[in-house]
């Protein structure tokens, strides 16, 4: 379908009140689903997955379906919350999810297993809300890690500083927001107090109408924020520990919920580990200023460590670039390389070649300091 015909189809679709429109169903999904409609399947969106079954919202309401046909060995290809799926029509017991439509976006992290696999957390997301509690000291490196995954997913990240009521001084709050903005170029940074309902109108305006996934550590206030956006106590909330501000896993599954003002929200369990998964472009977007500076380096493969004519190191020396940013950039790039190398033999060979090259440069530098080879 051409872009012009798709646009016209979308306009026509918007004039019809489709039962699934509040969940994001549009003309493009309708077009992609057409072959399955001919087979008698029903369209629906996955709102929850657990133990080999899932809840799917359809035009006839929410139904329970078996996921046996969409549970391959590859964890990146299993059905997940946010997927649009083809479900058996009424009559069969059990009813099966036959397939899911190609994903527009996918939020993926590496698993905690030693098999170096990716795990998909949410699909077809427009905005990734990274919730960060102001009840504890800001961890800018962790925020950068979340943002790298968010950019890589194809969604637009948004950082929400929760529990803003715990920072009563507006000047201090402004400095905290500024610190996060420095670590999140191109990303909206909002301070919100769900308890006082402050900042929620701005957040609703940013994420309303599409699909947003709520991410963050336990204790970041995700469930409280979700309840505030939903206008009801849909999610259980537990108090954080006073000693360190950490919370318990109040949310244990990923749930898709319709927002009263339009759009849907996917709430996720607190993430202790946020490993990168083939996120080089996401890391590049988080550290856009370093990537831009690198274009001015003398060598195109500059590692920004000790090379002559390095524009990045020059920016560090002049104070234009905080050293913390470069350290974080290096760490995430190394981690991402390791993950990719475990599944990509060519990448492993390139990394070994780079290590040898750097080793030779270091050896030559040491010999030059000593007055030449002995």
Image (cartoon, helix red, strand yellow):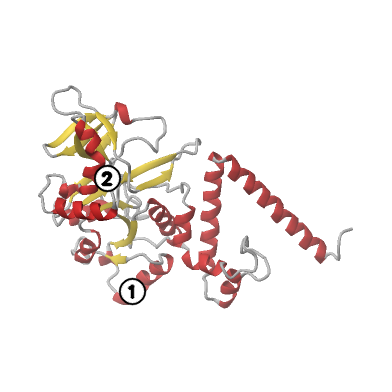
Local crowd size for mark 2, using a 10 Å CA cut-off: few (<14), some (14–19), many (≥20): some
Please state the horizontal and vertical placement of residue 172, each as a whole percent of the image: 34, 74
Give the residue at x 29% y 75%.
Answer: 170
Describe the element under mark 2 as helix, strand or loop.
loop
For the C terminus, the quadrant is bottom right
Please state the horizontal and vertical placement of residue 258, each as a whole percent of the image: 17, 49
Q: Is residue 282 above or below residue 189?
A: above
Q: Quadrant of residue 302?
A: bottom right
Task: Report if residue 240 is visible in the image.
Answer: no
Please state the horizontal and vertical placement of residue 124, each as a whole percent of the image: 30, 47
Residue situated in front as seen by the camera: 291 or 35: 35
Q: How many marks?
A: 2
Indicate left or right for 247 with 111 as reference. left
Numbered tag placed on residue 174 in the rendering: 1
Numbered tag placed on residue 250 in the rendering: 2
Give the residue at x 34% y 48%.
Answer: 105
Separation (CA) of disc 2 from disc 1: 30 Å
Please state the horizontal and vertical placement of residue 26, each as a whole percent of the image: 20, 49
Residue situated in front as seen by the camera: 79 or 6: 6
């Amino acid at each position: 379908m051409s872009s012009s015909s798709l646009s016209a189809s979308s306009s026509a679709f918007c004039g019809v009140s489709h039962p699934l429109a509040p969940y994001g169903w549009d003309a493009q999904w309708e077009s992609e689903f057409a072959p399955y409609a001919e087979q008698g399947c029903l369209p629906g969106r996955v709102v929850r997955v657990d133990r080999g079954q899932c809840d799917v919202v359809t035009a006839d309401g929410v139904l329970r379906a078996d996921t046996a046909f969409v549970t391959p060995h590859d964890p990146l290809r299993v059905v997940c919350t946010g997927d649009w799926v083809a479900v058996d029509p009424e009559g069969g017991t059990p009813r099966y999810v036959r397939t899911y439509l190609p994903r527009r976006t996918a939020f993926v992290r590496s698993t905690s297993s030693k098999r170096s696999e990716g795990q998909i957390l949410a699909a077809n997301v427009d905005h990734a809300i990274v919730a960060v509690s102001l009840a504890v000291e800001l961890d800018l490196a962790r925020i950068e890690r979340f943002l790298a995954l968010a950019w890589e997913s194809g969604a637009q990240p948004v950082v929400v500083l929760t529990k803003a009521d715990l920072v009563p001084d507006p000047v201090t709050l402004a400095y905290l927001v500024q610190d996060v903005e420095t670590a999140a170029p191109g990303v909206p940074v909002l301070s919100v107090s769900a308890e006082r309902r402050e900042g929620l109108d701005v957040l609703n305006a940013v994420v309303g109408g599409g699909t947003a996934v709520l991410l963050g550590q336990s204790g970041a206030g995700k469930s409280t924020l979700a309840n505030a956006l939903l206008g009801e106590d849909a999610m259980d909330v537990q108090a954080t520990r006073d000693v360190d501000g950490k919370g318990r896993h109040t949310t244990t599954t990923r749930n898709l919920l319709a927002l009263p003002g339009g759009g849907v929200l996917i709430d996720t369990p607190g993430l202790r580990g946020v490993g990168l998964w083939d996120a080089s472009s996401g890391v590049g977007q988080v550290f856009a200023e370093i990537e831009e500076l690198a274009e001015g380096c003398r060598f195109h493969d500059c590692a920004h460590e000790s090379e002559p004519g390095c524009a990045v190191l020059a920016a560090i020396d002049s104070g234009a670039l905080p050293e913390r940013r470069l350290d974080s950039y290096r760490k995430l790039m190394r981690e991402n390389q390791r993950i990719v190398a475990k599944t990509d033999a060519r990448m492993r060979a390139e990394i070994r070649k780079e290590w040898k090259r750097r080793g030779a440069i270091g050896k030559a530098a040491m010999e030059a300091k000593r007055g030449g080879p002995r």
